[in-house]
Image: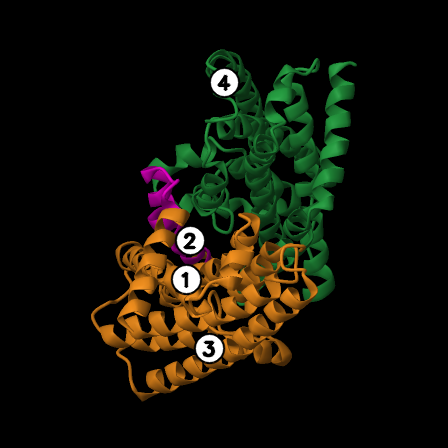
Amino acid sequence: MTEAMGAFGRIAKLAFRESYGVFSPLVYILFLLVRPMTQVLFFGLAARFATGNPDVTFQVVGNAVQVCALSSLLTVADVLVNERANGTLSLVTLAAKNRFMIFGGRLLVVGSHGLVSSTAALAVGALIFGVDLSQVHWPALVLSLVVTVMATSALGVALGGVGLVLRDLNLVGNILMVGMMAICGIQFPVTQLPGWLQVVAYSLPMTRGAAAARLAMAGGGPEVWSLLGTEALVGCIWLVVGYGLYLWLERKARVYGTLDLY
Amino acid sequence: MSDLTAVLSSARSQIGNSMARTMMKNVVFISPLFNVVVAYYLFRRSDLPNFGDQVVIGSGLMTLWGTILWSSATDIGRERWMGTLEILLIAPVRFPTVLLGKILGNTLLGALSVGLSWFYSWALLGVRMTVAHPLQLAITVVAAIFAFVGFALMLALLFTLSRNANSIANGLGYPLYVVSGLLFPLTVLPVWVLPIGLSLPLAWAREALRWATTGAVSASTLLTPNWAVAAGGLVTVGLVYFVAAYGLYRYVFDRKLRQLGQLGVS
């Protein structure tokens, strides 16, 4: 167990250096703070103008959850693609460590970055749009973010598995990312969408996570825990499907010798 | 080979190369769809008289801006990664000419994505966009392409100086959307932000397009007093960026990268 935790920590440390070590401090801040803050500002101002309603808590919380969750989706999904690009995919496949370490270590870095970005986004909401933070149930809000990140990462694992047999995973990842931003109740309520699109939205992570975070902002309540439970369940389903898919595709790729061919 | 032929040839080759990349296909064909959906549902319940134009122009310019930012950064990075940036610099055709063609190609693809925003809005969501002044719209589109090419040219040269170009381009999207007031009037922004917004072609393009499509109906949400001022501002900003790009190439890019030998490593 101690050895496993050590490996997890080492992967997290290396993941940080790999992902952010080449960035100048300015670019690092641009990504970590400026981008999420301006994203909230943009959609908050757009919603205020469109509806005439000065209360844009819906968009502020939605975007705070989104900046936290979706970066983890692509990061986890990109793990295998990057290994292939660097010529190390075969070594990773043969590694003695559990694959969960590889995904999880990176997730730790991205998740903690995501929480900082979400905090910055909420700060913009409070300072610029006057979003009320006095009623916030902080444990429920933090848990909403963490559960959503985990659930979205589970989807990332599935995406990563598909990446074993797909040349351009970034394409699928980006479509999923902008698609989820459009339909998962980030900028407007899911109930406004056509019925079939609501089904798609609720089968994806983040939809219930964002709803739970909004309830937590308003003081929490039993529905928060119910939403978070379902969000975790959606994440677990994606994880089982994704990890199963990954192991199956990895085995196929090893059998047919196609691991590095896509 | 004349410069014009080189520009057109470079643009044609750029469009072909871009369309061969799935990522660019996503930016041009799929991103507009999602931007339209977000803008549509944000504005659907508004009582704005120019609802359709808000959706089409706002989401269309978001996509166009993304295309320009992304392609300006990645094209240079790609040349550097393939080791062809140095060859481009010493080719018989001047580097800015080749770059101009590349950017023209990207901007035309971006313009196509604006057209697709209109198509998706109309075909999938039933949004109707009015065009009060077709001639003004046509002139605005040409002026916007001119201004965006000038801006992207300068941006591409700046990105040549940085190895973080892709990351910067990724991070700059929303800040520029905000200061350009893409989905809301510039008048809602603090006064100190306005000069930043007005130094970018996007804000002027948005103003000119809105004057051309809805005319006086949008007047209360526009900063400029009429279409002529907005279009004039658009052309002026474009010209300034062309001059700035030339200066950057002549006095910074050429010296820093060629004379100091830092082209492939900066």
Q: Is residue A131 above or below residue B173?
A: below
Going 36% across and 52% down the picture, which residue do you hit?
A14
Residue A190 is at least partly visible in this image: yes
Residue range in magenta is: A20-46
Q: Main secondary structure of the magenta part?
A: helix
Q: Are marks 3 and 4 in contact (CB under 8 Å)?
A: no
Direction left: furthest residue: A134
Label 1 and label 3: CA atoms lie apart by 20 Å
Label 3 and label 2: CA atoms lie apart by 25 Å
Identify residue type, mark 1.
Asn
Of the pair A176 and A251, the residue shown nearer to us: A251
Q: Is residue A30 magenta?
A: yes
Label 4 and label 1: CA atoms lie apart by 40 Å
Location of mark 2 (residue):
A39
Check the residue under mark 3 and report the chain it is in: A
Letter of the chain in green = B
Tell me which label, 1 or 3, sits earlier in the chain: 1
Check the residue under mark 2 and report the chain it is in: A
Tell me which label, 1 or 2, sits earlier in the chain: 2
Please state the horizontal and vertical placement of residue B198, each as a whole percent of the image.
Answer: 46, 33
Quadrant position of residue A45: bottom left
Identify residue type, mark 2.
Gln
Q: Quadrant of the N terminus of chain B?
A: top right
Label 1 and label 2: CA atoms lie apart by 7 Å
Q: Are marks 1 and 2 in contact (CB under 8 Å)?
A: yes
The disc at residue B257 is 4
Identify residue type, mark 4.
Leu
Location of mark 1 (residue):
A63
